[in-house]
Structures are given as structure tokens and as C-alpha cells.
Amino acid sequence: MPTKKSWAEPWKIKMVEHLHMTTKEERIKAISAAGYNTFLLKSRDVYIDLLTDSGTNAMSDRQWAGLMLGDEAYAGSRNFYHLEKAIQDFYSYKYLVPTHQGRGAEHIFSQILIKEGDFVPGNMYFTTTRLHQELAGATFVDVIIDEAHDTSSTHPFKGNIDISKLQKLVDEVGADKIPYISIATTVNMAGGQPLSMANLKELRKWADKYKIPIAHDMTRVAENAWLIQEREEGYENIPIKDIVYEICSLTDHATMSAKKDPIVNIGGFLATNDEDVYRQAQNMVVVFEGLHTYGGMAGRDMEALAIGIEESVSDDHMQARVGQTHYLGQKLLDFGIPIIVPIGTHGVFLDAKKFLPHLEQDVFPAQTLAAEIYIESGVRTMERGIVSAGRNKATGEHYYPKLELVRITIPRRVYTQSHMDVTAEAIAVVYERRNSVKGLKFTYEPEYLRFFQARFEPIK
Ligand code: F0G
């Protein structure tokens, strides 16, 4: 009798999309034309696209059917009311303001809450989130636990907030300089690491004491809930749906990139329990996104999102989603390849400092590694290191993040286990020849979110 029970996807395939295979010579040309930046590759030249799980998901037949129910009225679309009900029923928030995607919500939220000279503490930064906080006049302060910066620490909740770091900030600048605490459920830049319910409850108590609201980046909240179910005492038998609801109800406001957890290709929103913030957001959304009952989304997209939210909190879906990521991560570990442990949910993160220890951070090891993986196999991954971290706006110096990572991100319901095998084997080949890999230098560096459009050339 086999001792370990395999998991399988709780769906079957109804339609396929052909992939384009390339030769190594073609890929060398393609990555050079893309300035050694995987964001600048044409998707036609990519075989297995593991750049991101954002907007790259496969919708279900129910969601596709939902598209046909799109009510494209400029005002008061019925799909808005369906989406509003889904936000209330599954996420607990009272008020909804849709936006075209996550950063649209971050922009509006930051502008409403932040005053020049404020400080926003958070459990590690996310690129767009921190930029909007900075553009609104705030300084971001990282208050994640130290273990999050250590790729080999096996702490089960590396997304946790260190309350003593928060306390230190309040003691230094005063609670009135902190408009909100910015928490992300599963911390993307830390390798998809979760925070625990116990930590969130402790944070809630602390925040109440100082009357500081908690703003929740809930982009991958269901994935965090899955990890709580797996790792936190008392949650083993609680459905994901209930854990998601409990997490949300411990926070005051939320921004979401709906392109992740809820399995759609576009969309986002701001949600809140605060009527005053809601009124201001409704007013701002008409300036920057669209009327408050669509905020930049088509009616049909709001319908697909409402259905996707319900599908995303199912235990079966989540088991397969995370099961696939863990399958890939375990294969890489078996090859002896340095990755962040514990393995997260939306992707596996290669530790580029350990993979290419002969490269200084100034020559962009993770950027280099992502280009090498593409050349080897046509698999597209993403840099999450010094290039993503950008420059300190006051000094103009690079931020030197402790984590120098390549993210291998898994879209939801898109690739099979065999695609994961091919990916792991390709990375193992690059690992074999790692000593011959040289670094990169900038040939073009944009001012904002430079990782998206920067160009490089190999160092001779
Ligand atoms: N917050 C988190 C945690 C994210 O991962 C993202 C996007 C955003 C906010 C911004 O949302 O893209 O809809 O405007 N992450 C993508 C990624 C880009 O690849 O991880 P957006």
C-alpha cells in the first residue's frame, strides 16, 4: 500500500492553448533584444511562462459563462452588486470601490490616508505598494520579523510582524505620524510567507491601543489561509473560507489585486469598513479610474471576479494550487538547489546569492539568473532582488535587500505537473554550470519601478 496520498487537480481540461518552442540560438537572440530583462521578452518567445501569477490564471467554465452576463451599464451594473455581495460575504468588508487592478486601489488609498512626513510600517515592502506610499509623502518602515530576511530559517510564519519594531517606531515618531499599518497576507517579496492568526490578533490589540487602523493587502489572502490551516494549532479543521473571513475581519481596510487569488485576468478593489474612507475613495475613483460602480472594470469582469472569489476559497482548489507549488519546490530541493524554505504558495524562490555566490549584488545576480534560465529552457521567471528594490529616494543609492531572489511563479490552473518537471530539470542544468555565469550592468534605468523596463548587457 502506498503510504503517501497524491493530490490531483479538482478540475479537468476543456480547452488548450498551444505553446511555442524555440531553439537555444533563438532564445539567446530574444533575451539580448530584451535587454536581459524577462519583462521585455515577447510572450511568443516563452515556452513555460512563470513570470507571475498575476492575471495569468485560467478561468473556469462558470466564470466564462459569467462573462456573458456582463451588464455594461455605465452606472449601477448588476455585476457590481454581485461583486459587492461577494466582498461582504467572503471577505467581511462593508464597502467596495472597484479599481482596474491593485495599484489603482493603492494609489487612492495612499492619497486619502497619508500626509507628507508620515511613516507607514509594514511586513516587508511590495514594489507598487511602497511606491504609492512614498508618492503620497510617507516613509516606509519594515517591521517584519528578522527570520523573513533569512532564506534558510524554517520559521512557519515568516510574514509575521515584530510588534517590538512597531513599538519602537511609535516611541520614536509618535502614533499620530502613523496613518495605518500596512500588512500583506502572504508576503510576496519574502518568498510568499504567511502571517499567523495569533500574530494578527496580537497586532489588532496593539493597534487598538494606539488607535492605528490596519490596512490589509489581501492579494493572496486565501493562500495565507491555507498555510494557517496547515501550520497553526487549532485551525487544522477550519475551512479556508472561514479562515479568510476571520483574517479580513481583524483588519479595517483592504486593497486587492484581484488578478491573483480570485483567478481572473484583470481587476482589483479597495474595501473598507470605514464610511468616511469609503466616501473619499468613491470620490477619488471617479477622477482616476471610472465611476464608483465599475472603477475601470468592465461589467463582465466584475462578474467573473465575483464567481472567482467563491471558487478561490474552496479547500480543494487551494490544496491543488499549493500542492503544485510544493511539488516544484521539493524537486528543486532534491536537486540540491538553494531555494527559500519553507516553500510558499504562489511560487518557489531561488536564492540567487547562494546559487551564484561569486557574483556581487551590484552585478545583479538574480537578474542574471533569470536570463540564464530563459536561455537554457525558454522558462520565464522574474528577478526579486536589488533591481526590484530600486533606489532610496533621499540618497539616490540602491537599496541593498538581504534577499536576492528569482521568483518562479505558478499561474493558477494553467500548467501541469510535467511542466513543473521540465522547469526543475532546466534549472538543475543551469546550476551545474553556475560557475561560468557572469553578471550584468545597466544600459537603461527608468525612474519608477525600474525592474519592469530596465535594460542590461552582460559584463565582459
Ligand atoms: N500587492 C501585492 C502583494 C502584489 O503582489 C501586487 C502585484 C500588487 C499589490 C499590485 O497589484 O499588479 O494588480 O496592480 N503583484 C504582481 C506580481 C505584479 O507579479 O507579483 P497590481
Image (tube, grey):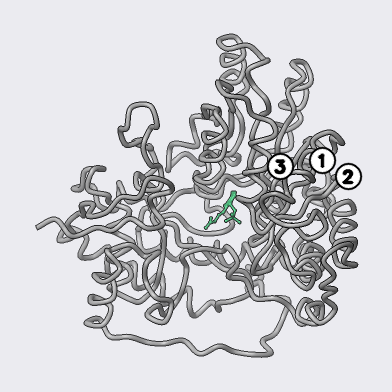
Q: From the viewer's perspective, is residue 237 above or below residue 108?
A: below
Q: Quadrant of the C terminus?
A: bottom left
**Residue behind mark 3:** 232
Distance, label 1 to label 3, CA atoms, is 33 Å
Q: Secondary structure at mark 1?
A: helix
Give the mark nearest the N terminus, 3 or 2.
Answer: 2
Residue density around tag 2, few if under 14, some if 14–19, many if 20 or more, within 10 Å: some
Please tell me whether residue 79 is drawn above or below residue 257 in the rendered image.
below
**Amino acid of disc 1:** Tyr
Classify residue 47 as left or right of residue 274: left
Residue 349 lies, with reference to residue 119, above or below; the image says below
Q: Which residue is mark 1?
A: 278
Residue at x-position 36% and y-position 53%? 338
**CA separation in Å, label 3 and label 2:** 28 Å
Q: Where residue 212 sits in the image (x, y, percent)? A: 73, 23
Q: Give the residue type that dot 2 points to.
A: Lys
Assess mark 2: CB under 8 A from ligand 1?
A: no
Looking at the image, which is closer to me, 385 or 418?
A: 385
Secondary structure beneath label 3: loop
Return the residue at label 2.
94
**Which of the marked residues, 1 or 3, is nearer the chain's N terminus?**
3
Distance from disc 2 to disc 1, alpha carbons, whole Å, reads 9 Å
Q: Are marks 3 and 2 in contact (CB under 8 Å)?
A: no
Q: Is residue 434 left or right of residue 414?
A: left
Q: With respect to residue 135, does 409 lie above or below?
A: below
Q: Is residue 252 left or right of residue 442?
A: right
Q: Amino acid at mark 3?
A: Glu
Disc number lying in front (1 or 3): 1
In contact (CB < 8 Å): disc 2 and disc 1 = yes
